[in-house]
Every structure is written in C-alpha cells, then in structure tokens.
Image (cartoon, helix red, strand yellow):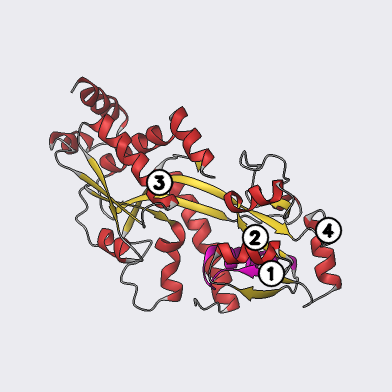
Amino acid sequence: MLLRFAVRVLTVGIMVCGAAAVFGQNYPSKVIRIVTAVPGSANDIGARLIAQGLTSTLGQRAIVDNRAGLLGIEAVAKAPPDGYTLLFFGNGGVYFSGFFQSDVTWDPEKDFSPITLGLTSPNVLAVHPSLPVKSPKELIALAKARPGELNYASGPMGVEPHLAMELFKSMTRTDIVRVGYKGTGPSISALMGGEVQVMIANAGTVMPQARSGRLRALAVTTAKPSALAPELPTLTASVPGYESGVFIGLWAPARTPAAIINLLSQEAARALNRAETKKLLFDSGLEAVGNSPEEFGVILKSEFAKWGKLIKTLDIRKE
C-alpha cells in the first residue's frame, strides 16, 4: 500500500490539471487487462513483463489476454476508455491493417491513444555468402549492374520483411525480384540454401546464422547502431533515411484520461527497463524502449506516413 501511495503522489506532482480527479477515483481499482497476440510471440513476452510490472507497482493485478489475428485490436478499440483494457501489439497490425483489409473497423489515429513504445528489434540486410558483396553499397552496385537478375526471399506480401525489402528497392532504385515463402523460417532456409541471394529479416533470426557463417550480414536497419548486432554498420549510412524493424507498443482506447495514460507510460517503461528484464528481452532479440506518449505518437505518425506512401505507391496487396 505504501508503494502504491508513493507512485500516486509522485504522479500527481507531475500531471496536468485534472489528474487529481482521476486519482480520486482510485485508479486502478480492478484488474487491468492487456490484450496481445498469440502466446510465445514477442508481443506476448512484452505484455507479460509489463503486466508483472504493473501488478507489482500499482497494487492491482494486471493480466494478459491472448487473441489471435486482429480480433484483439478491435476489442480494445471498442473498450471503455477507462485504463482497464490495453493493447500491446506491433504497430503494423494496428496501423497498417486498413491498407490491406476493407473490413477493418477501427481508425488507428482516432480510436487509440498511444502510451509507450515498448519493444523494438532491428532488421538486418543479409545475403548468401556466395554473392560477391560485403557492404550495402556493393550490393546496390551489383543489383544496378544486373537488374532483375538478383532475387530476395520474403514471407507473405504485406508483412514487415516484405515491406522492408520493397522500401530498400524503392530508395535505392534497384530491381531485385521477390520470391515468396510461407514465413520467415522457410525464407531464411531458402537464403542459406542459395535459392535466393538477398533478404531483410529480424536480427534475432539472421544474426545466429550470420555468426555461424551460413549467411553474410551487411547492415542493421535501425537509424543508430544496435546492441543486438554491434558489429554491423547502419543501412542508413549507405541509404540515407532508411529505417525498418519491429516496433511493439502499448495503447489504450482513445479518450482515456491523460493522467491514466501518463501513469501507465511511466510504469510500463519502469517494468521493461529493469536490468533483469532488459537482459531477458535482449536474449530474445528484443530491445526495451519505454518512452513518453508524445514520443511514441511522433514515431507512429512518421511510420504511418512512410509505410502508407510505400503501400499506396507500389499498390501492394496482402496475401
């Protein structure tokens, strides 16, 4: 109880006008539910760590509600804006589904309030070791010298690895032919087997194979160097402005009071940035962030504009 009281006092001290009324309602006074994707996914791992953190600091139990597909996103969009139903999900599912599916019932910018960017994981640009390139610039030069001759592996169209490679092609003006597979696993196997020459995929998947010599990693796709692949340069050094990767965030329904949003942002960030938690995430190929609602909102706006333009320009259809 003392810890719960201390958290509330600290929060009240930094909240904007109106916070006192919210805390007068004794938030949280019941179980907090965090809706996320299937068990064992990166979404699920992060949601459970946040739930543990909220339970320990807010004095009220937080639980994880796993829902497959887009049903969970829809459920949170329609939930009461009271801070008791939250969403922890990759921004692609929340923000880009409307580009591909006509039956999406939520507006990503109107129906959700961003709380914090929880987790990120960079992509890595990789090639088969037989390809005579050792840097992104060499790959770009080779692709321009041999338009349409190189090919790349991806899972289904419209998912992050496919979009990441299409963004690379668009920004470098190269013609590299897509070869589709059912998922990341078969795609990586195809790259290691030499069926394809190029791929952009998550660092957690690529780096073990690159360090074993079965693939050659050329660059990490984050704007800054990543601790998950410290030996690699950034792709933006060769392709200015390029950035892609996994972004998983925490949202509440729109119109959730600002005081609740700010409290949840602080406590979720605290939960994810504990030393033992950061190590667990790092070992799983994930990096903890935990920023403010405003900072998360800026990232979302930029991501939505970038990927939305790419999808519309190339008329990408999801498989």
Vertical comparison of 39 with 151: above or below: above
Mark 1 closeness class: few <14, some 14–19, many ≥20 residues within 10 Å: many
Q: Label 2 is placed on what type of residue?
A: Ile
Would residue 213 be found to the left or right of residue 65 on screen? right
Name the residue that disc number 2 marks: 200
Mark 1 to mark 2: distance in Å? Answer: 8 Å
Residue at image point 34% right, 63% down: 68
Q: Which residue is mark 4?
A: 133
The amino acid marked with disc number 3 is: Ile
Mark 4 or mark 3: whose residue is earlier in sequence: 3
Q: Secondary structure at mark 2?
A: strand
Q: Secondary structure at mark 4?
A: loop
Query: Spatial distance from mark 3 to mark 2, Cα to Cα?
Result: 23 Å
The percent coordinates of residue 213 (x first, y second) are 74, 50
Does the segment drawn in magenta span residue 302?
no
What amino acid is at disc 1?
A: Tyr
Q: Which residue is mark 3?
A: 45
Residue 145, image x, y percentages: 86, 71
Tell me if residue 162 is in the magenta stretch: yes
Residue corresponding to mark 1: 152
x then y, percent, for residue 138: 84, 59
Using the image, determine if residue 69 lies above or below residue 136: below
Are the residues at dot 1 and dot 2 in contact (C-beta closer than 8 Å)?
Answer: yes
Q: Regarding mark 1 in the picture, which secondary structure is present there?
A: strand
51 sits left or right of 225 in the view: left
Rendered image quadrant of residue 214 = bottom right
Tell me the magenta residue range: 152-172
